[in-house]
Amino acid sequence: MKTTKMKKTAALVMSLLLLFSLAACGNEKQAAAQDVSEPSSGSKGSEGRSSASEMEDAGGTDETVSDTESASTGGGKKTLVVYYSASGNTEEAAGYIAAATGGDLFELEPKEAYTDADLDWTDEDSRVCREHENEDERNVGLTSTEVPDWESYETVFIGYPIWWGIAAWPVDGFITANDFTGKTVIPFCTSASSGLGESGKLLEEMAGTGDWLEGQRFSSGVSEEEVKAWVGTLGS
């Protein structure tokens, strides 16, 4: 009887030991599986996720900078319409050109503005007549000759009224103060009867730089449709 009880007890102990052994083995496997699917902060998998996140952030920043730079440079060809207007006719034509081209306007303003009396060409003592007779007096100071972001403009229109067959001399200061290298320059003028004449050629010689086109003369009170039609021919 004692022998039989001892055998049963031994069998029970062996069974319990086997169960403990299997349970321990299962826990080790579970722990190993967790190490693979959830890598620690020092593991290669964690570094991979962090690096990818940093690259995405960097990519987003680069893209934002690129968009800003693109906006600042216009993303393409920019047009500037520079003009001096004595009585408003050239200003009107300049506005039509800017509207047709999507260009920016830049008005040339003499430091000492011309009055109606100054512009009376029938009066020999008027300012404009004195300047015409004495070239030394044609050096008209302007409030500004510097265009913001000048280098970004590829096409520049230069507008002026015709005075005694040439460009009104208040534009001269702008021409001599700027470098037109790499720019297409298109002169235009307004007058009651005179044509463009040699005004554009003389300005080109004065500038010494830029690719100057022939240009166009508009009558006083030119319509927007006429200006748009002319602008449309420039790309052909």
Image (spheres, grey):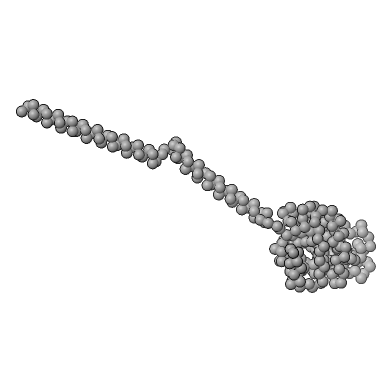
Residue 74 lies left or right of residue 25; in this view the side is: right
Viewer-nearest residue: 210 or 173: 210
* Residue found at the far top of this picture: 3
Q: Residue at x 55, y 49 (%)?
A: 60
Image position, residue 95 (x, y; %): 74, 66
Vertical arrangement, residue 143 with respect to residue 225, above or below:
above
Question: In which quadrant of the rendered view does residue 87 lie?
Answer: bottom right
Image position, residue 151 (x, y; %): 74, 52
* Residue found at the far left of this picture: 1
Vertical arrangement, residue 94 with respect to residue 11, above or below:
below
Viewer-nearest residue: 144 or 5: 5
Vertical arrangement, residue 45 with respect to residue 128, above or below:
above
Image position, residue 42 (x, y; %): 44, 36
Residue 31 lies left or right of residue 94; in this view the side is: left
Question: In which quadrant of the rendered view does residue 230 lie?
Answer: bottom right
Residue 41 lies left or right of residue 30; in this view the side is: right
Q: Residue at x 21, y 33 (%)?
A: 18
Across the whole image, how many numbered discs are drawn on residues? Answer: 0
Q: Residue at x 53, y 44 (%)?
A: 55
Question: In which quadrant of the rendered view does residue 214 lie?
Answer: bottom right
> Is residue 64 at least partly visible in the picture?
yes
Rendered-image quadrant of the C terminus: bottom right
Rendered-image quadrant of the N terminus: top left
Viewer-nearest residue: 213 or 190: 213
Q: Residue at x 57, y 48 (%)?
A: 61
> Is residue 170 at least partly visible in the picture?
no
